[in-house]
Image (tube, rainbow, N blue to C red):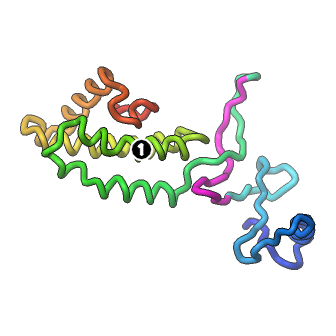
Amino acid sequence: MAPAQFAPGNRQAARIARRLAQVGLELHPDKTRIVYCGPAGRHGPATPGQFTFLGFTFRPRLAFNEKIRQHFTSFLPAVSLDARKRMGRTVRSWRLARRTDLTLQQPATKINRIVAGWINYYGRFYKTEMIRFLRRINRYLVRWACRKYKRLRRRPRQARNRLIEIATRHPGLFAHWHHGALPA
């Protein structure tokens, strides 16, 4: 069942519009919709909705209750698909594999500021989604090592193992390594 659109006939929408009008705000009828954000089966549709706001997709996700040590489903934000695509285009634009003239430290200083900004913004909520994306940078680093060093030319597994050794010795070399996206 699709989320209820912000339609003039919708009573919830009318109540929200009246409340916002009291403080001098109005909602755009094409951009606004009402989404059920609670757990499935409780006071709402059987399938909870999702929405994207400020680069985060809010939808039901697995959470953990520390007090009773149990997993449950909660409505949580994480980096959106559009934001991941945008970040992926940026990572590809660096063309790391082609920069064989650089030492390992040079790409690290080049990309750390950008990646740290992504981590600080998108990694604030549901960091595992962000870490899953950041592991993609490790694949580009493996390609870089395969092209830079002749002994690793057609040996991506050995290049990845070499990257793992470097990451264990210098976990702060790349910003994404420092935050848990180590090569594995």
Between 59 and 112, the residue placed more toward the observer is 112
Relative horizontal placement of residue 172, taking residue 105 as reference (left or right): right
Query: Which residue occupies 68% across, 31% down?
Result: 64
Of all residues, the one furthest to the front in this rendering is 24
Give percent across and percent down for residue 165: 26, 24
Query: Which residue occupies 61% across, 57% down?
Result: 54
Residue 52 within the segment the image draws in magenta: yes
Give percent across and percent down for residue 20: 87, 66
Magenta segment: 51-66
Q: Can you say whether 23 is above or below 69 in the image?
A: below
Q: Quadrant of the C terminus?
A: top left
Give percent across and percent down for residue 155: 15, 38
Q: Can you say whether 21 is above or below 162 in the image?
A: below
Identify residue for label 1: 115
The local crowd at label 1, few if under 14, some if 14 to 19, many if 20 or more residues have their Cα within 10 Å, is: some
- Three-letter code for the amino acid on which mark 1 is drawn: Val
Residue 145 within the segment the image draws in magenta: no
Q: Quadrant of the N terminus?
A: bottom right
Give percent across and percent down for residue 79: 55, 50
> SS of the residue at dot 1?
helix
Relative horizontal placement of residue 5, taking residue 54 as reference (left or right): right
Query: Which residue occupies 18% across, 49% down?
Result: 99
